[in-house]
Image (spheres, rainbow, N blue to C red):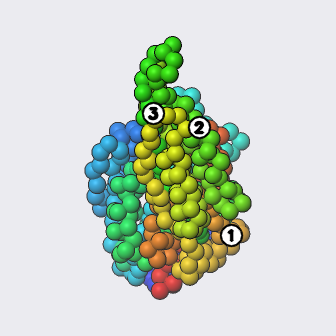
């Protein structure tokens, strides 16, 4: 790094890492483009696994040992580990999958316009991959080796609620002093210090088929589901942070046939266990109540992410990040949000957790999603500064 190796035992600040990273800006932008072009929608196992190989190659070049947890039908999880000569055990959480199905890239190509990079998954969280890799490169270039162990968990099914990733993440978190999460920063650059509970619920309605002209002989699962969808949507109470969204519906076999099956995928969010259980009880009630005779409903799933509640260890991480941000001329706050992440699992186990360390941008999970390209070296320097100073918290 331009300032030379970091003297043994002396923490290095974000400002010095930034000196190394500014000349790397073009390389970071290029890597972001390659990552976005490697589509990795949650239901595209081959794509997620290809993306995992891209990221793991960068980790291996940095001296990490890679292990794979093979999964079906979704993407594999990758765990990168590296020992060190210092103190403290760090867990970094990223995910390899995106919400965008295979083929989205054909209509939403990676591009940079007026300093903003666009493309499927560019912010959530391929920009996080770039930020993390270059933060570790800056640390390596500075000769910094201040932790006893660094583990990076790369989840292959995070956008689905981490159903197979969760137990592995919790296993790693139980043996960590801190967890840093590469989800994107808030639009104003803030990091995240708290998240609500998140649920994934599936509703299946069964009916009876008949030709549409056979009056009274069929029982439409589609019509029954339509009634339930309206009642489900009405459960949202934004004033208290409760959200219910029916995001996917499907049903029927032909336009002239009364449908005997219909399904809905439901997203549930609530800030506290009490509110989460309350809205789940209402959802179960709606599922159990039929308006069209001859139909029935089955509900599966539930709360998949526990609350990420701000605690003392998280506050100290925030203060460390704020001090590092000052070296970069930045002022950042600690935000609380209704969205969930794999950081929920670590925080719920009492691990000091800081989230939102990825790049700046906006409109995550929409077709207008973008990364502020200039934020890549800045956020990588911030992350490197936080990591380099973690031992001071022990």
Q: Which residue is mark 3?
A: 294
Q: Nearer the viewer, mark 1 or mark 2?
A: 2
- N-terminal of the pair, mark 1 or mark 2, is 2
Q: Nearer the viewer, mark 2 or mark 3?
A: 3
Under tag 2, what secondary structure? helix
On the image, which quarter does residue 320 sit in?
Answer: bottom right
At horizontal 45% and vertical 33% (from top left) the residue drawn is 294
Under tag 3, what secondary structure? loop
Where does the image place residue 381, in percent across and percent down from the top left? 57, 65
For the residues marked 2 and 3, what is the alpha-carbon distance in whole angstroms?
15 Å
Q: Which residue is mark 1?
A: 333
Q: Which residue is mark 2?
A: 227
At horizontal 35% and vertical 38% (from top left) the residue drawn is 46
Q: Is residue 87 visible?
A: yes
Name the foreground residue: 220 vs 167: 220
**Which residue lies most toward the top here?**
213
For the residues marked 1 and 2, what is the alpha-carbon distance in whole angstroms?
43 Å
Q: Is residue 30 visible?
A: no
Name the foreground residue: 236 vs 248: 236
């Amino acid at each position: 790094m331009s300032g030379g190796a970091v003297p043994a035992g002396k923490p290095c600040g974000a400002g010095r890492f930034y000196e190394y990273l500014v000349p790397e800006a073009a390389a970071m932008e290029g890597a972001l483009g390659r990552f976005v072009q490697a589509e990795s929608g949650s239901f595209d196992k081959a794509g997620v696994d290809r993306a995992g190989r891209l990221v793991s190659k960068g980790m291996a070049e940095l001296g990490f040992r890679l292990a794979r947890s093979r999964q079906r039908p979704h993407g594999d999880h990758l765990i990168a580990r590296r020992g060190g000569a210092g103190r403290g055990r760090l867990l970094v959480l990223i995910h390899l999958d995106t919400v965008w199905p295979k083929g989205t890239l054909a209509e939403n190509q990676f591009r940079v316009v007026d300093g903003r990079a666009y493309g499927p998954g560019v912010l959530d969280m391929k920009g996080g991959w770039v930020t993390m890799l270059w933060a570790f490169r800056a640390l390596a270039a500075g000769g910094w080796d201040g932790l006893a162990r660094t583990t990076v968990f790369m989840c292959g099914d995070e956008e689905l609620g981490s159903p197979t990733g969760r137990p592995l993440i919790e296993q790693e978190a139980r043996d960590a002093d801190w967890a840093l999460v590469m989800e994107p920063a808030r639009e104003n650059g803030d990091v995240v210090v708290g998240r609500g509970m998140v649920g994934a619920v599936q509703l299946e309605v069964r009916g009876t088929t008949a030709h549409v002209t056979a009056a009274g002989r069929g029982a439409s699962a589609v019509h029954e589901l339509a009634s339930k969808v309206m009642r489900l949507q009405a459960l949202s109470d934004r004033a208290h942070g409760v959200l219910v969204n029916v995001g996917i519906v499907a049903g029927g076999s032909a336009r002239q046939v009364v449908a005997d099956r219909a399904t809905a995928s439901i997203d549930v969010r609530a800030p506290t266990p009490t509110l989460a259980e309350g809205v789940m009880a209402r959802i179960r009630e709606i599922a159990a109540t039929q308006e069209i005779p001859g139909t029935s409903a089955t509900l599966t799933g539930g709360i998949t992410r526990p609350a990420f509640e701000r605690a003392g260890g998280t506050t100290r991480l925030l203060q460390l990040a704020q001090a590092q941000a000052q070296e970069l001329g930045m002022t950042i706050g600690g935000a609380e949000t209704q969205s969930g992440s794999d950081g929920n699992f670590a925080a719920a186990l009492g691990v000091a957790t800081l989230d939102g360390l990825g790049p700046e941008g906006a409109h995550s999970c929409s077709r207008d999603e973008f990364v502020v390209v200039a934020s890549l070296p800045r956020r990588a320097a911030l992350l490197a500064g936080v990591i380099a100073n973690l031992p001071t918290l022990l």
